[in-house]
């Protein structure tokens, strides 16, 4: 029985377009990429903004982090530039003799209380700065600022902003639903101790100055900003803070908003979907979760949930909340991951990839999507 390519293509084309659209939405991004080779119609569908947006809304969040590796990997996708000419090495021809930073993803199965660490086989990182819709703002080993989609392996080098010798700075990466543009924000403390701000729009690829926050508003840049609905939010200090700082990416202005309670060392801002949440440790046994909601013309904090345990939970640091708001994931230092089910009101320790060592310095929420930017092109 022979089935010619032409016959297969004709059979595929007989399927209703809407049905193909809905079926493909059910697949993970890495599998969808392979299906772009089926036929031109499928490739056009998968590359369309409508499909990418619809698929992104279905994607659940994962954790992404950097970890050192030293074993020989000659086919690793390397994000470094050479000779400062923005020429990227796709695969490092020289396997590393010393440790390099590689990106990893942690995917969760809440039904079975386990998590799996996957390896996209991408190296050459110096630091992850921010994430948004499956795109990662990072620097590579040579210090080049870039945007990367680990799933599609599309890569875009960016112009460097103001160089801050003390590294007293914060980067944000946000998508504006209003303008449909991605922007990178750089907030930093200059040599005189004043806070300055600059914004890079991917549509212009130029850094421009913008509104400067009030002196003293930022205490430090320990906490990374959280983005939702075109707004960035910062916790401006590590402890004993009673407000947050926000920046509307369209208005390009900073604002201050009071928190419902004063922060502790392990308190964090967490987003789920289009909502911002504040997770606060009140006592040794109690954690409270507040959600920022819009009521008429103002935003107010509404208590979402209180976690009460009969054992010490002070070491738990909130990492992210699922899109549906049911599960809240915590890490305990660098050694364990816990999940709290807000419907069942139960806390449980998750088994991570057979309890393998997964120590990391900083983790970010991420999604495996097909998202790109308007002026990008694939590297192959």
Image (cartoon, rainbow, N blue to C red):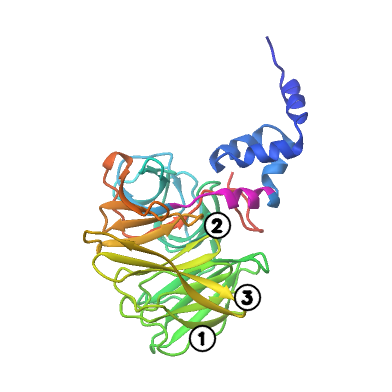
Mark 3, residue position: 250
Mark 1, residue position: 212
Q: Earlier in the sequence, mark 2 or mark 1?
A: 2
Q: Is residue 44 magenta?
A: no
Q: Is residue 5 above or below residue 342?
A: above
Q: Is residue 156 above or below residue 261?
A: above
Q: Which of the 4 image quadrants contains residue 93?
A: top left
358 with respect to 22 (left or right):
left
What is the C-alpha distance between the residues marked 3 and 2? 18 Å
Q: Secondary structure at mark 2?
A: loop
| Residue 191 % position (x, y) | 38, 86
Q: Which of the 4 image quadrants contains residue 340?
A: bottom left
Predominant secondary structure, magenta span: helix
Q: Earlier in the sequence, mark 3 or mark 2?
A: 2
The magenta region covers: 51-62
Tags 3 and 1 touching, CB below 8 Å: no
Tags 2 and 1 touching, CB below 8 Å: no
């Amino acid at each position: 029985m022979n089935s010619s390519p032409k016959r297969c293509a004709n059979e595929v084309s007989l399927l209703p377009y809407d049905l193909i659209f809905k079926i493909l939405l059910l697949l993970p991004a890495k599998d969808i990429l392979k299906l772009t080779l089926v036929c031109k119609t499928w490739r056009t569908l998968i590359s369309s903004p409508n499909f990418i947006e619809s698929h992104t809304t279905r994607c659940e969040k994962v954790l992404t982090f950097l970890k050192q590796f030293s074993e020989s990997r000659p086919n690793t996708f390397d994000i470094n530039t050479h000779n400062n000419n923005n020429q990227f090495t796709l695969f490092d021809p020289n396997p590393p003799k010393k440790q390099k930073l590689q990106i990893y993803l942690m995917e969760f199965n809440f039904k079975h209380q386990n998590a799996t660490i996957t390896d996209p086989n991408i190296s050459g990182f110096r630091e992850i700065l921010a994430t948004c819709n499956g795109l990662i703002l990072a620097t590579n080993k040579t210090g080049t600022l870039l945007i990367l989609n680990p799933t599609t392996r599309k890569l875009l080098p960016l112009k460097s902003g103001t160089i801050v010798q003390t590294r007293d700075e914060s980067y944000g990466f946000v998508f504006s639903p209003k303008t449909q543009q991605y922007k990178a924000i750089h907030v930093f403390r200059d040599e005189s101790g004043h806070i300055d701000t600059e914004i890079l729009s991917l549509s212009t690829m130029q850094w421009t100055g913008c509104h400067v926050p009030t002196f003293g508003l930022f205490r430090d840049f320990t906490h990374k900003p959280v983005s939702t609905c075109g707004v960035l939010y910062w916790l401006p200090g590590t402890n004993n803070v009673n407000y947050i700082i926000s920046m509307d990416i369209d208005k390009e202005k900073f604002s201050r908003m009071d928190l419902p309670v004063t922060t502790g060392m392990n308190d964090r801002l967490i987003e789920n979907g289009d909502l911002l949440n504040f997770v606060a440790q009140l006592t040794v046994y109690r954690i409270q979760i507040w959600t920022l909601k819009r009521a008429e013309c103002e935003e107010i904090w509404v208590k979402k949930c209180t976690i009460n345990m009969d054992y010490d939970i002070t070491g738990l640091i909130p990492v992210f909340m699922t899109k549906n708001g049911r599960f809240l994931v915590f890490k305990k230092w660098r050694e364990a991951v816990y999940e709290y089910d807000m419907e069942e009101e139960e806390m449980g320790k998750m088994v991570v990839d057979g309890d393998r060592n997964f120590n990391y310095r900083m983790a970010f929420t991420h999604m495996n999507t097909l998202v790109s930017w308007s002026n990008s092109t694939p590297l192959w």
